[in-house]
Image (cartoon, helix red, strand yellow):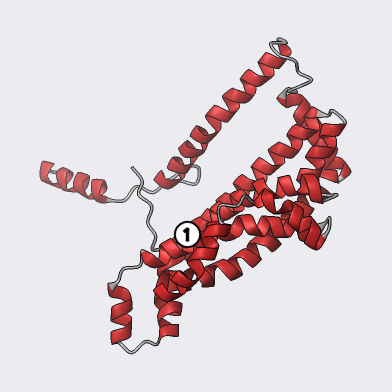
């Protein structure tokens, strides 16, 4: 083979795409694996330091039990079904409250962001109610609905409503003004404009509002269950506080963190599937 032919062959082989074998990871997979490793490094180091500090008796392990004891207590609660029962009750209340909040806050936010007259009408009362903490509604909730499911859902609904409303208004106002003008020039009605232009364009902000609402919902529902419920993760934490079981208190707290993180990741995955045009900047 001549030198010219060898050079041509080398160029052809260099231009061929490199296919990863069955056991080889592609660039995207390697990037995801590296990101997962980075996410796990700091929590792993903190858990190890926590365990070592407890074994060396650098603090009182009765007040803050080591991770190994918390893990054993979690296995016991899972085996008895108690943890799942409290988790299911809290999750049901979270779902009910956020569905009601979305059904009310998203349409109201779209109309407030779109129509100045409607915003002027609603802005006063909403800005008076918004600074009131959800926990301040607990006495009225108990008075109106009594102890139990309705009171907890109401308090959680208040917490989620304003987070979704504010982000929906911001999303509508952020819509490129040329899009509604173009739709109207093509003969779109006001209902078509909201349904086909404004709502899809505001969806990224709405998803952000829902993610924030889920976070504040967990904070408010735990406090509400401490007072107005006989089940749920908040009730479980308060019950084990009374019997001085700090390990089981930590199980409840860790459960809330894990569930909240999983729900947030789930929303990010759903947003990626529903809004493929929203590109995240990665450097």
Residue at 24%, 50% in the rendered image? 15
Q: Position of residue 59 (x, y in %)?
A: 71, 13
Q: Residues within 10 Å of mark 1 (few under 14, many from 20)?
A: many
Side (left or right) of 190 relative to 238 = left
Q: In which quadrant will I find the N terminus?
A: top left
Residue 84 showing in the rendered view: no
Residue at 47%, 43% in the rendered image? 32
Residue identified by numbered label 1? 167
Label 1 residue SS: helix
Question: In this picture, is 141 found above or below 230?
Answer: below
Q: In which quadrant will I find the C terminus?
A: top left
Side (left or right) of 19 relative to 64 = left
Side (left or right) of 252 relative to 176 = right
Q: Position of residue 25 (x, y in %)?
A: 46, 43
Q: Position of residue 132 (x, y in %)?
A: 60, 52
Residue at 42%, 47% in the rendered image? 28
Q: Position of residue 65 (x, y in %)?
A: 75, 23
């Amino acid at each position: 083979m001549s030198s010219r032919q060898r050079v041509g062959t080398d160029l052809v082989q260099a231009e061929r795409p490199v296919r990863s074998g069955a056991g080889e990871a592609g660039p995207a997979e390697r990037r995801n694996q590296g990101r997962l490793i980075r996410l796990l490094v700091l929590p792993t180091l903190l858990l190890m330091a926590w365990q070592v500090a407890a074994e060396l008796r650098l603090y009182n392990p009765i007040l803050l039990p080591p991770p190994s004891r918390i893990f054993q207590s979690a296995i016991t609660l899972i085996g008895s079904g108690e943890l799942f029962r409290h988790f299911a009750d809290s999750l049901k209340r979270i779902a009910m409250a956020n569905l009601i909040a979305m059904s009310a806050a998203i349409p109201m936010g779209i109309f407030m962001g779109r129509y100045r007259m409607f915003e002027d009408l609603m802005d006063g009362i909403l800005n008076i109610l918004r600074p009131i903490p959800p926990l301040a509604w607990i006495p009225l909730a108990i008075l109106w609905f009594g102890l139990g499911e309705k009171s907890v859902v109401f308090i959680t609904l208040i917490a989620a409503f304003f987070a979704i409303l504010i982000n929906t208004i911001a999303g509508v106002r952020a819509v490129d003004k040329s899009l509604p003008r173009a739709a109207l020039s093509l003969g779109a009605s006001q209902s078509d404009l909201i349904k086909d232009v404004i709502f899809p364009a505001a969806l990224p902000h709405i998803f952000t509002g829902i993610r924030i609402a889920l976070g504040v919902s967990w904070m408010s529902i735990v406090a509400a269950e401490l007072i107005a419920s006989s089940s749920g993760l908040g009730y479980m934490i308060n019950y084990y506080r009374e019997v001085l079981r700090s390990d089981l208190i930590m199980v409840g707290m860790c459960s809330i963190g894990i569930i909240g993180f999983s729900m947030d990741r789930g929303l990010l995955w759903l947003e990626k599937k529903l809004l493929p045009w929203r590109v995240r900047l990665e450097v």
